[in-house]
Image (tube, rainbow, N blue to C red):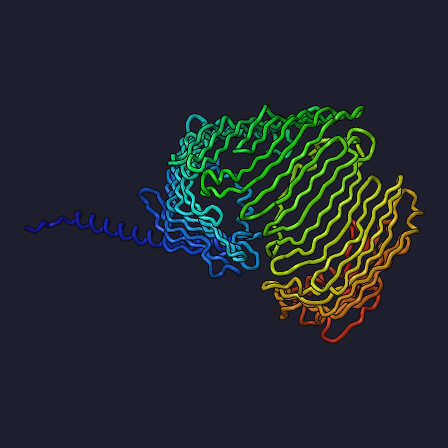
Amino acid sequence: MSIKLKRWQKITLISIAGILAVLIFFNIWLNNFLRKNIEEGFNSVLNAKVNIEKLKVNFFTGSVNIYGFSITGKKDFKNDTIAYLEKLVLKPLSYDSKTMSLDFRDITISELNVKSIISENGNNCWENIIKEDSTARKEAENENLKLFVENFTLENANIEVIDRQTNKNQYFRKINVRINSKKESGKIISDFSSDCLSVTDYLGEKSFSVSGNLKYENNIIDAAAVLKADNFPLNINLKLNVDSVSLIASELNIDADFSELPVTEDIISKGKLKLKISSSGIFDNNPVKSINAVFSADSLTLLNTASNKELFADFNIAFNYYNSTHRDIKIYSDEMLLSSGDEQIKGFINFCLNDSVLAADSDIAGSFGTGVLNEIFEDVTSLPVINLNVSSGIKGNLNAKENKLNGEFLTDISFFSKQAKIPEFTVAFNKDNFKLNTFICSDLLTGRFDYQLSGFENIFKSGTLKQLINTDISSIHIPATNGMADPGNITGLENESPDFRFPVKTETVFRLSVDSLVLGQKAITNINAELKYCPGLAEISNFNLNIGSGILSGKASYTKMNDNMQLVTDFKLLDLDLSFFANDSVDIAGIISFDFQNTVYEGPDTTIYRKNKGSNSLKIKGFHVKTGFLREYEIDEDYIKIEDTELYAELNADMFSISPADIKINDASINLKGEYNILNNSILVPVLFDIPDKYLSSKIKLAISMFSESSEKRIPEKEKRNTYLLRIGGTITNPEYKVFE
């Protein structure tokens, strides 16, 4: 039986079908439009290539699904996918343009794989990933968007840390994170959990998990969590007051109950280990107001019944730092005991140091080694081994009036791990001296460091406190890197007052000896110097280092007597081959030598400037560097080349003069000379440019003509070349520039 539709029913069905077809077409168009715009947005911001396989927007639920989001690196990482996301699901809840608040009901990230790679040249794939000149970076810095997510889920993520210089890798696998949050009457309450597997050469494969809750209310973060390492629980409590009006206060408590250690057949464990830290102002730019820490072991016992190896610890050590009307540092303990077999350390310590007194009361002695932990757990832990020998019976006070410190504090420590060895670390302290001696052997540094502080009785008096620092290093290895890290905007340092203001004069001698400083695949060798500092004198002598075939040597001193100052410099660089700095991304060569010898005086009596004298020379041979700078200005050349050039400058009384010099850079010529008057701070530097037509586009010529003036003196003209005179005058702090043609 067939149903005969009425005319209006047919029209309705056709209309619905048409609307659905339009919606489907619009959805497909919108998905592709959004996918391409998101790709273009990321690619305009990142120094990487971003690709999205598929994007879907659900009109009915408002959710956005992104599939196959990948980031491919550039340059050293052009063949590496440094991030790949299988699926991202965003379910927005609301957006308030007035408060700049964006709320999500759900964010789910599935199968995320991230790689952090250090290339053979020492570059990190995530370093400078955001373009410095991107408007998105500036907008992000100024944007005050408040983001809230009710349910966040990360499923089966993986992180690989790959070092292609050392061929050592680390893996974090099967990472799962769940965070559920809700808003209640001005506060945010969250519960969270996470777990992962860590694979390293040092620890092998270990499992980690964390679960807990967090509350944010009235600028106070209060969190509690249980961290498990191979199912051994650590209880963590954190409280942080982030109120910007007052000092940031923090509290951190970590405790481990060893009775909860996973049960094994041969190991008995009990007792507790606790760490409590509180602070005020430590996260601010203002001076730190206080730090308090307590580290304690409550009858901690670990016993391997099969090998009969046992460790027992019972101690309570505290550290206090206060900075108010006066400053105090205190380290003290109750009677403590560390024992294992025939080894034990027993006793107490009590030290106090402030602006006016050093007080000590200690009686502790014995030896102990942490290697017993690896014996108890039968190498399952692979912990570093620390051997400690201590003997302290120092007591008494040291202040401006008296030195009644009696006895001596002696500590001898050795440290052994797979990454580094410190076979010697000794500290000795008595009423006359403080000594520290250590020898370090690691992949990055091998050598010894010795420090001695003498004249200790003068620390609170007007006498001289003498410091002697000796370093004798056979090798320092620094992984190669191209570029320098941005230190960021460092603020608040100018407000930081010294922790202690001892009324003492200090004389410091620092002797440095480094056989080789290895930078990637290259080495700076034979580094030697002696630095000396005391009131009125700072000097460096016996300075020398070899950079490839080049040798840099010299000395300098700064002397101040009453209101007069003398600065003497004498540095020489002989035959530095700039190809030493060349690598896969830097093409540079040339030989540079210089000889700088100057004696400069300064004081309220200007006649002292008559003593100034100096001679300076700079020689350049066969210089070239490959750059894209020239092509940015439509110059069809890849290299900047400088013909053999010699520059000379002389210091005579109050005048520093640069002798006339001709410098040829590619097909352009520069003729210059200059004068700087030290007394009135004035400068006069005329520079004559002779530039071929092929280097100047019509736009550049027009720009120069807009700022140039007609010269009163005739400037020589040449066919198919352009001549300009740049005159730099005024003062060194406020120079004036004029261009003549």
Q: If the image is split into quadrants, where does the C terminus sit?
A: bottom right
The answer to whether one can see residue 499 in this image is: yes
- Apparent side of residue 317 relative to residue 594 in the rendered image (left or right): left
Q: Measuring 87% from the left and 52% from the top, which residue is drawn there?
A: 599
Viewer-proximal residue among 333 and 198 = 333
Task: Give residue 122's position: percent from left, percent from top.
Answer: 57, 56
Task: Give residue 8's position: percent from left, percent from top.
Answer: 17, 47
Viewer-proximal residue among 726 and 597 = 597
Q: Measuring 17% from the left and 50% from the top, which residue is drawn there?
A: 10
When asked about the image quadrant of residue 632, the answer is bottom right
Position of 450 relative to 260 (above/below): below
Task: Give residue 180's position: percent from left, percent from top.
Answer: 39, 35
How many marks on residues?
Answer: 0
Task: Give residue 619's position: percent from left, percent from top.
Answer: 78, 65
Q: Measuring 55% from the left and 37% from the top, which residue is drawn there?
A: 369
Position of 255 relative to 636 (above/below): above
Position of 104 relative to 576 (above/below): above
Q: Residue furthest bottom?
A: 719
The answer to whether one can see residue 94 in this image is: no
Viewer-proximal residue among 62 and 239 = 239
- Apparent side of residue 703 relative to residue 271 in the rendered image (left or right): right
Viewer-proximal residue among 527 and 19 = 527
